[in-house]
Image (cartoon, grey):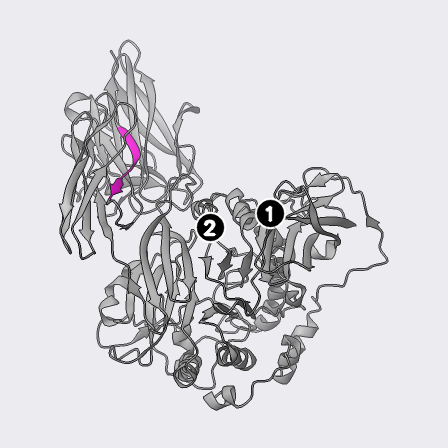
Amino acid sequence: MLGFEKWLKEFNLEKMNRRNFLKATGKSAAATAIGLSIPAINQTEEIEAVPVFTGNPFTLGVASGDPLPDSVVLWTRLAPNPLAEDGKGGMENRYVSVQWEISYDEAFNKTVLSGKEIAAPELGHSVHAEVYGLKPGKEYYYRFKAGNEISPVGRTKTAPQRDADIKSLTFGIASCQAWTGGRFAAYHNMVEEDLDFVFHLGDYIYEKGDTETLTDYRLLHAQYKTSQDLQAAHAKFPFIVTFDDHEVDNDWSDDISDPNYPEGERERFLAVRAAAFQAYYEHMPLRRRSKPNGPDMLLYRKFTFGSLIEFSILDTRQYRDNQVGSGFPGGPLDPEASNPNRTLVGSEQGEWLLKNLRDSRSRWNVIAQQTMMAQYDYDPGEGISVNHDQWDGYSADRDRLFSFIKKYEPSNPVVLSGDWHSSWVNDLKEDFNDSSSKTLATEFVGTSISSGCGWKNQIEEALSVNQHVKFFDGDYRGYVKCHVTHNSWESDYRVVSSPSNPDAVAVTLASFTVKNGKAGAVRIGGVDITRIAADTMMAGQPSPVKVTLSNGTAKQVEVSVNIPVPTGWKSESVTKVLEPSDESVFDVLVTPPAEMPAAERLRVEVDAGETAVYGPPRDIQVVSALSGENVQLALDGGSSSTPIFPTYKRLVPEDTWEVSNGYGWVGTAPFARDRGNADALQRDLIASREELTIFRVNVPAGIHKVYFLTGDSVYGSANTIIRSDNKLLAEAGYALDPGQFKWLSFELDGGSTGKEIDLEISSELGDGAWRLVAFVMKGLK
């Protein structure tokens, strides 16, 4: 029984590796049977000292990690063709000598240390150079050389001496980065921050349905590492990483991925896990202690930064019992979830964690891990519904930890979590069902880098019965920036408007502080942007962009709101004085061009003087439309039951071609969708995933300009493509983000007497569905 006393009775100083742990628990047979341990480098093989590459071997960039007072690990992987189908990165089956260099300056005017590593084919020609002899708390620059090729320069920083009295530490938290085509706006902004290091708390990649072999996982990691934004973040900061589930398989537990455990699943999954672990190690700045042994990998570890802060990094996947319960995002609480014999972290790791907390002399004691630790009841009624993949499914482990914190009172415990694609601040309570019970620690849950939160509504519906949740947001992607001193901890939730748009500027959604000696986070007051909204505008007519601001301070604040606009647009600024606790709507008049419709992302500037401004990204997608009274044809795509944009006609999937109408669908009809969250034009649309959809229109005599609005107020849109007679007329050119719209324009020639023209609509990228929001045809003079 893994009871509380079992964890506390002894703190074994001798580290038990995963292999011994498996033997001790009777789980070693499959681990040895599959025979997928990473082979040792054969030192008798010939090593290429001056290799010749078919291209730049450093296509995946450089990275550093696991900073100690005298050491960091430096990483790269030789891959002149990183996405080569065999997973070998364009490298031959040869050993290559790789030199590393460290300098105090980026220009390498003086090399401080240098050495050589062997890039072996057994490890995908990855390099993990563990460099020792560095000075504590010092910034360094590093690079690699292979043959005549030199890598990009990276920056790293060592940890301070264990007992050093450092004044502060600043670091970032990242997690959950679904592939967005190579652009990660969060990382693009993160590199502008002044950080000592970055935590990555898991879901670095997302497996696909057929991802099983080492080649599969290598290609997936290589794809992610080709992102210039991700490479820049790794080159700028040392990373401390741990995995969650998607580095291997969704919701995996210990030695299975399917809770129903079909015949032969355990052996199959251990082979998959071995492949996933090896590829993960090959692409991460990890020390040799974390090098996998088949399906086993030692990843939990501790980092101390002076007397200020100590981090215990957990692995909550390898040692957990099989999940119980069902339902997503939550399901009825399974009685087995509180079984004291069930564990999330395993006996050895649990003892190790409590020993760290007991022995620590640091001001702040941090548990950095994957899934949310706080309880969350998804049932706003009388029942209890939880997510069994999180600590709620293993509540005995949480009870053991909380009992320890209550009894031994480690200094300022803080929990950092990821996984849930959303931002949270939670009070970790002695009794979550009693809001008056003691707060034992604070939990900061970071949002995702790019992965969406499709279960946001279910969370919001139950917030009222979860009083320990002090903050939640599921709309925005980004990262958390933490600044820690001996007196306080401050967490800034930095978010972007679009996860894949590198031009999206990160803003602080909210900031929270924890004071030394007092568990529980308090929101930092300022001027808060609570809403930015604008309905579809009429071309050439002034319309308001409504910016709602509230004053969260105890003083009077003068606030100005301005919206810079492109050439051909006009805007007016608005200034008001906000009283303490006051909320007001600032109507900023914006006039779009009169001659054509437009779709622009405008940035809202809020100036509150010395008072900090918080809230969602300050940009908004603004759409203008030509009036239907001034054009030959103006159609609002959607269903027959939704509102129609003024002066426009409704275009529905049932509008098959009829000469009397002058427009309609030919062949397979599309479908309609109503998002219900915007004005009459933007809320609904017509879409299709068919290979080709024909829309026929009667074009009068002469040349006519056509405007085709594509996009989706809720979901991302595929690249919409329009052709006629197999000739390309217009396309978006890329997949659009949720809430993004774009007017496509092209000309149609009706000749001297007018004619019927078939528009061939198709799509690519994104979710594979083209969108038609509005269709306008205007004669040219």
* Amino acid type, label 1: Gly
User: For this view, does 647 lie left or right of residue 292?
Assistant: left
Nearer the observer, 636 or 669: 636
Q: Which residues are magenta?
A: 598-607
| Predominant SS of the magenta segment | strand
Measuring from the top left, give residue 398's x and y in whole percent: 41, 79
Whether residues under marks 1 and 2 lie with C-beta atoms below 8 angstroms apart, the answer is: no
- Residue 311: say if magenta: no
Using the numbered discs, state the Cα–Cα distance from disc 1 to disc 2 in whole angstroms. 15 Å
* Rendering quarter of residue 458: bottom left
Write down the residue under mark 2. Answer: 194
- Residue 601: say if magenta: yes
Above/below status of 754 relative to 13: above
Of the 4 image quadrants, the one containing the C terminus is: top left
Measuring from the top left, give residue 572's x and y in whole percent: 19, 31
Nearer the observer, 458 or 431: 431
Q: Is residue 644 visible?
A: no
Measuring from the top left, give residue 468's x and y in whole percent: 28, 71
* Rendering quarter of residue 447: bottom left
Q: Secondary structure at mark 1?
A: strand
Above/below status of 488 relative to 156: below
Write down the residue under mark 1. Answer: 154
Q: Is residue 777 visible?
A: yes
Q: Residues within 10 Å of mark 1 (few under 14, many from 20)?
A: many
Above/below status of 686 relative to 527: above
User: For this view, does 734 lie left or right of residue 81?
Assistant: left
Above/below status of 701 relative to 391: above
* Amino acid type, label 2: Asp
Nearer the observer, 37 or 208: 37
Measuring from the top left, give residue 342's x and y in whole percent: 47, 82
User: For this view, does 164 lie left or right of residue 619?
Assistant: right
